[in-house]
Image: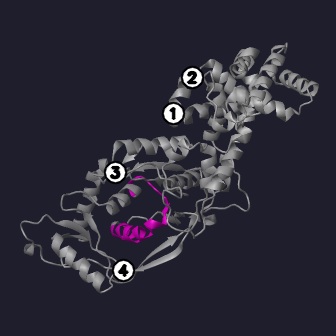
Amino acid sequence: MTVPVVTRFAPSPTGFLHIGGARTALFNWLYAKKNGGKMLLRIEDTDRERSNEPAIAAILDGLRWLGIDWDGDVVYQFARAARHREIAEQLLAEGKAYHCYATADELKQMREAARAEGRSKLYDGRWRDRDPSEAPADIKPTIRLKAPLTGETVIEDQVQGRVVWQNENLDDLVLLRGDGNPTYMLAVVVDDHDMGVTHVIRGDDHLINAARQKQIYDALGWTLPNMSHIPLIHGPDGSKLSKRHGALGVEAYRAMGYTPAALRNYLVRLGWSHGDQEIFSTQEMIDAFDLSAIGRSAARFDFAKLESLNGHYIRQADDRSLVAMFEDVVRFMPGGESITAKLNDNTRAQLLQAMPGLKERAKTLVELIDSAAFIFADRPLSVDAKASAVLTDASRQLIGDLRDALAEVPTWNATTAETAMRAYAEANGLKLGGVAQPLRVALTGRTTSPGIFDVLAVLGRDESLARLTDQAPATAA
């Protein structure tokens, strides 16, 4: 009988959902969906000093925003500490683990000696076969795994291939600390086993952990899950991903105006390929995803490519969904509260009307919000420096004349406004561009904007004429 696929995403809640973690979650989610299985979520909060509730909330929120859901309840690793201790004690009782009474100073000396001699094995095994009667009374012992001293530990990795470690180079792992708390290595093995995880998909920085964890699986007689260690994400220059490259939390990309669909699409192509295809719907990702198509070399983060992809998704998005995304992102922006305060049925309707023009020019939702600023501007408009240079006496006179011509338009829309402006330009021997730019400055306070006739239509007759009056000479008012 075929065992159903069960993957898991297991972040440590010591910070926000890192972009690399988001990709790991996505790969686990896609593999589970592709195979009709489940993806479980486990918060590995055994590091009590660094784990915190805001980080947990940010991880859950980041996953939901990306559209990555999980099956069942969230599992919290620390809450399972009693189960982890039970397994450590079981191994001890079976003679597969032992009490270690080495002091902190002794362990430090062992590490220093091993490093000086170039040995990767740091613990010298001094308590491995020692009589417990020799145990010092004032030391709380750890429990260490009695790891094999000879032979090999082998992982058949779906991405890295066959990886082999010589057991003579691997330490006897600490399973339970002197204070009774389980170590990460033990907790991960027990949790993956108890949760029925069949496939572990994680970053290749965990590859050495796979060797150590396999030794625990072997000692317990448990089946090792299928392993896939995916390369980490590097910066464009090939160095380790840093904040300047994009090593940020998912919430930062949300605030920068990237859409969930675009970020999801970008992440799936970081280290995984499906021919030359770049754009994937969610269902296409699920259908095509395969562990064998993940490369062994580190993927390189490219903001320009992400922006280009994001622009595509913005242009393809439904206008109403973009209004909702507009409202979501503006909450994160500096000064965004002033726009949020002005969001009402009327401004939302204006946004929706303007969206076809706004989304054609924007690579991010932040750019889209900036282009829509004219909708929320207060009178008299704040005019930027470049636009101020356009407002000469002659252009102000022209603005007054344009206001008068537009006031005669019987039915107000983009088409009638354009007809009136073309007629004015032709009658006065002007090019349409010579008319449009002063009009744009008077209506938006900027030299760039969506199509000027669309701006007139979105603002409506009364607001448009009022803004033109503000910039016209007093004598023309």
Seen in the image, is 232 located left or right of residue 175? right
Could you tell me if the residues under marks 4 and 2 are in contact, i.e. CB atoms within 8 Å?
Answer: no
- First-in-chain label (3 vs 4): 3
Q: Amino acid at mark 2?
A: Lys
- First-in-chain label (4 vs 2): 4
Seen in the image, is 314 located left or right of residue 433? left
Q: Tell me residue 252's x, y (percent).
A: 51, 46
Q: Which residue is mark 4?
A: 167
The front one of 424 and 227 is 424
Q: Which residue is mark 1?
A: 335
Q: In 3D space, how far apart are the residues under numbered discs 3 and 1 (Cα atoms)? A: 35 Å
Vertical order, 239 against 396 (above or below):
below
Q: Which residue is mark 2?
A: 342
Q: Is residue 285 magenta?
A: no
- Nearer to us: label 4 or label 2: 2
In which quadrant of the rendered view does residue 405 lie? top right
Q: Which residue is mark 3?
A: 45
Q: Which residues are magenta?
A: 193-219
Q: In 3D space, how far apart are the residues under numbered discs 4 and 2 (Cα atoms)? A: 66 Å
